[in-house]
Amino acid sequence: MTAYLGMSTKTVQLAGHGGDAVDAYVATPDTQASVPGVVVIHHMPGWDEWNMEVTRRLAHHGIQAICPNLFHRMGDGELPDVVQRYRDAGAINDAEVLGDLQAAVDHLLASPVSNGKIGVIGFCSGGRIAYMAAAKLDVQAAVDCWGAGVTVPPGDITDFRPEAVIDMTEQIRCPVLGVFGNDDQNPSPEQVDAIEAELNKHGKSYEFLRYDGAGHGFWGWQRPGYRQEQAVDSWAKVFAFYEKHLGPAAQAD
């Protein structure tokens, strides 16, 4: 009979950018071993059930994971209302996001089960943030899942987002794995080509998985765009990527 790795979960409060209180969901595998940590960066629909499931899935596979609520500055209330305030604002401040993510990284590094190596994974707008984190934070692996907004026209530069993320490519300090659907238009295949060209230009270590028959958010089991075959294949490759660059995960007895 197959043995499964147990886990514990909880919500903690981090001291994020400027000391702001940030709620974060943490899932820890039940193990005495030293394991990698991964910061889960939620998508534009917010800090929702699906992101919690991703966090637990990582722990089920022997990785400690944390998902901070990056929309906490949008105020309290029901999730749809919070997300609408985010949409009305147009963006969240990149400097604040990076400060909040650093707090999540620090929380994982302080864990008694940490092996000292941290990865990030982000979805949609969170994929853009994961790419930015690869350039701006001391992490050892980054996964960008259909990150929208890595390439932006000059007119979209704002006080909240003063630098195009693609222009940060030269600063990237860790391997990057990209997961994309070829039917997606945000990012479109042409935008993914542009990101890949920039990574090649600067000699960065990366791998892009590009799936036919899949569009935006094709891991989302709760949506019509879910694509089982492509999701299963890419999940397996994400775990292999983390094992290569972050070290082995915990195993069930």
Image: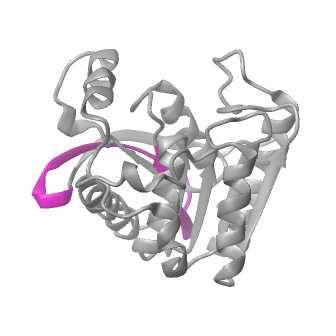
Is residue 120 depicted above or below 84 in this figure?
below
Magenta highlight on residue 246: no
Magenta highlight on residue 24: yes
| Quadrant including the C terminus | bottom right
Identify the residue at horizontal 80%, vertical 32% (top origin): 214
Identify the residue at horizontal 62%, vertical 57% (top origin): 143
Percent x, y of residue 10: 36, 39
Whether residue 158 is visible to the viewer of this picture, yes or no, is: yes
Is residue 80 depicted above or below 102 in this figure?
above
Identify the residue at horizontal 54%, vertical 73% (top origin): 169
Identify the residue at horizontal 72%, vertical 22% (top origin): 225
Residue stretch in magenta? 16-41
Total labels drawn: 0
| Among the 4 quarters of the image, the one containing residue 233 | top right
Query: Which residue is at the far left?
Result: 19
Percent x, y of residue 168: 47, 72
Q: In this orientation, which residue lies closer to the viewer: 71 or 87?
A: 87
Q: In this orientation, which residue lies closer to the viewer: 214 or 99?
A: 214
